[in-house]
Image: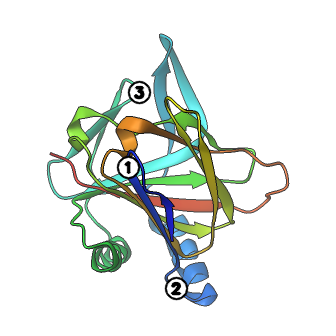
Amino acid sequence: MEIINNDGLVIYYGKLTTDDEADSYLKTLLETIEWKNDEAIIFGRHITTKRKVAWYGDDGYSYKYSGTTKQALSWTPELLELKKLTEQITGEVFNSCLLNLYHDGNEGMAWHSDDEKSLGKDSAIASLSFGAERKFSLKHRISKETHSVLLENGSLLIMKGATQSNWLHSLPKSKRIAEPRVNLTFRRMI
């Protein structure tokens, strides 16, 4: 289902797995990924987030954002399996993955775009979600038009074309959500 088809393209594919498969992936990712609290430099201040992250990818890729640099860890078998599935469905090729662990609805992401130079202009970012269903919102930089979609357990969304140049996205906080969510954002670094 197309969420956005102007000044970029955002497609929500929905659930790719059964609930049991999604729950199994969530359990494995929670147990095997080398999670670390995210660090960022915001308005000159060094902060450490409650949200945890991990950076995996092909050898030699690092990722610099918010004033910090992460060196890619080697792919796990499960991440390679999920990367292959994501590539088959989207027709894109990815060489890295930023994983986010939101422990509950008290953790989210403010409006931002993934427009770092290392990603290249108009590159695709595929987002695979496991765990708690969460609302994902998009807002046009100029018109302020907004769209939201509920990301289901085991679902896939892709942002491509000029989406990062023209749209911001966020994961709003929600006090009603008590379960964790793991989000895999597959990327192609240059």
Q: Is residue 52 left or right of residue 63?
A: right
Q: Residue 17 carries which label?
A: 2
Looking at this view, is 14 or 182 the one in front? 14
Which numbered disc, 2 or 1, marks the residue that appears first in the sequence? 1
Disc number lying in front (2 or 1): 1
Establish if 36 lies above or below 18. Answer: above
Q: Kindly state the secondary structure of the residue where label 3 is placed.
A: loop
Establish if 111 lies above or below 52. Answer: above
Kind of residue at badge 3: Ser
Q: Kindly state the secondary structure of the residue where label 1 is placed.
A: loop
Kind of residue at badge 2: Thr
Which numbered disc, 1 or 3, marks the residue that appears first in the sequence? 1
Establish if 139 lies above or below 8. Answer: above
Disc number lying in front (1 or 3): 1
Confirm or deny contact between disc 2 and disc 3 (CB under 8 A): no
Q: Is residue 68 left or right of residue 157?
A: left
Establish if 86 lies above or below 144. Answer: below
When asked about the image quadrant of residue 121, the answer is top left
Q: Kindly state the secondary structure of the residue where label 2 is placed.
A: loop
What residue did someone put label 1 on? 8
What residue did someone put label 3 on? 66
Kind of residue at badge 1: Gly
Which scheme is used to colour this image of the protein?
A: rainbow
Identify which residue is drawn at 26% across, 46% down: 122
Instruction: Give x and y (percent) for residue 158.
Output: 41, 61
Instruction: Give x and y (percent) for residue 33.
Output: 44, 62
When asked about the image quadrant of residue 73, the answer is bottom left
